[in-house]
Image (tube, rainbow, N blue to C red):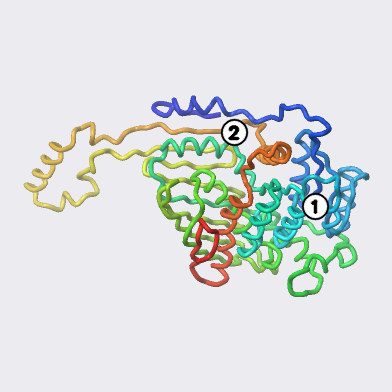
Amino acid sequence: MLLAAGSLSSIANEHAMEKRVISYQKKISSADKIRIATIGMGIMGHADTDTALKVPGVELVAVSDLYTGRLDRAKEKYGSNIFTTRDYRELLTRKDIDAVIIATSDNWHSRITIDALNAGKAVYCEKPVVQKLSEGLPVIEAWKKTKKPMQVGSQRVSSIVYREAKKLYKEGAIGQLNCIEAFYDRQSALGAWEYTMPTDGSPQTVDWDSYIRGIEKMPWDPKKFFWWRNYRDFGTGVSGDLFVHLLSGIHLITDSLGPVKIFANGQINYWKDGRDVPDIMTAIMEYPESKEHPAFQVMLRVNFVSGQGEKGVTRFIGSEGVMDMLDNGFALTKSVMAKAPGIGGWDALHTYPQAMQDELLKKYNEKWSQEAQKIPEVPGVTYVAPDDYDEHYEHFVNFFDGVRENKPLVEGPEFAFRAAAPTLACNDSYFQKKILNWDPVNMKLV
């Protein structure tokens, strides 16, 4: 629902016509059926699979996971006829699989993506698209070479909320953008990635050797497998997990390619459970002027013991207003300056001799009319998505339309890497204790 008044009401009425959820209306024939496999059956593996199966004409054929308990659960949940394996490569050789969902630990994203593309599969990969900056361009190269559809899972890129906000931003509703403040905070052990452990986790039920393939050998550690987000070897910390959502939305609305300068700091402040990545992190990024937008600053934060529950806001601050992106909508408030610069009040005027004050006031009133001295009162806009709206579902609809009809996807690997790379650079900045310079056009460090 989009609400507004006064001078912005025409904008509100124009956009309100587009508020409904995109539903899947087309008829699906047997030839249109898409058969999928999911690689990595953790939390996001289940969430992605469940959402994908809501799209008509999608069928789950197989799953892969390194823990046998999750393979057993997949058969319980999705049917005993699905194929299960610890080795994802077995899925890529099957002719009855059209697309794969990759929801593994971050360190496996690029390897499995490239293998799947080269095997002729369409790919839906969870964010961040890669774990390391060096992996981004090889993934993009494989995508271009194979020409297979690829979507990355930052679902707010498909959100109706962000589409509506982008229209207002592009029409100048906040004036000239100058900075963005964004945070994504949590306040629970589960939110800080201390997930429930299984009762039977061991080297017998987990293929630990495959899990650590490509990195230095280390002994079995259940935390590093089931709580992998907390470790540099397997995850990307709060920046790769949550900053990437913030930057995806920012880049979507501004059409930006990314920042040129990145600095991050943080610490392990509260969750001292053996993790080696911060539980609180802040970052500052410098976005240069481009044909798409003016120069602006971005300030990011994640705090895993927020004191205020789980909350996230992205605030676009412009010369004439502020737009707050919330969980299920946005609020735009206006603050337009008077044409006249102002005189008196908290001003140096009263420190001058009285005669000079009188002369300055007279000249000011002669130059500026009473109307020009008034601060305009402009109403804001509030938008709330429909109750039944699901941006995660929209993201998968877009993906499967791309698979069936070769339609453009909203988050291919180039967009995804441009959003992920600055967040990965935040980790490098934090651990290396330095400012990093980034080329957002060519997607490389400079």
Specify the farthest residue to the right: 80
Specify the farthest residue to the left: 355
Is 155 displayed left or right of 201 in the figure? left
- Dot 2, crowdedness within 10 Å: few (<14), some or many (≥20)? many
Residue at which label 1 appears: 41
Q: Secondary structure at mark 1?
A: loop
Do callouts 2 and 1 mark residues in contact (Cβ within 8 Å)? no
Residue 413: image x %, image y %? 63, 52
Q: CA distance from mark 2 to mark 1?
A: 30 Å
Is 70 displayed left or right of 19 in the figure? right
Can residue 243 be seen from the camera position used here?
no
Residue pictured at 80% horizontal, 74% vertical: 219
Task: Please name the amino acid that badge 2 sits on.
Answer: Ala
Residue 89: image x %, image y %? 83, 57
Can residue 202 be seen from the camera position used here?
yes
Above or below, 14 relative to 279: above
Residue 343: image x %, image y %? 20, 44
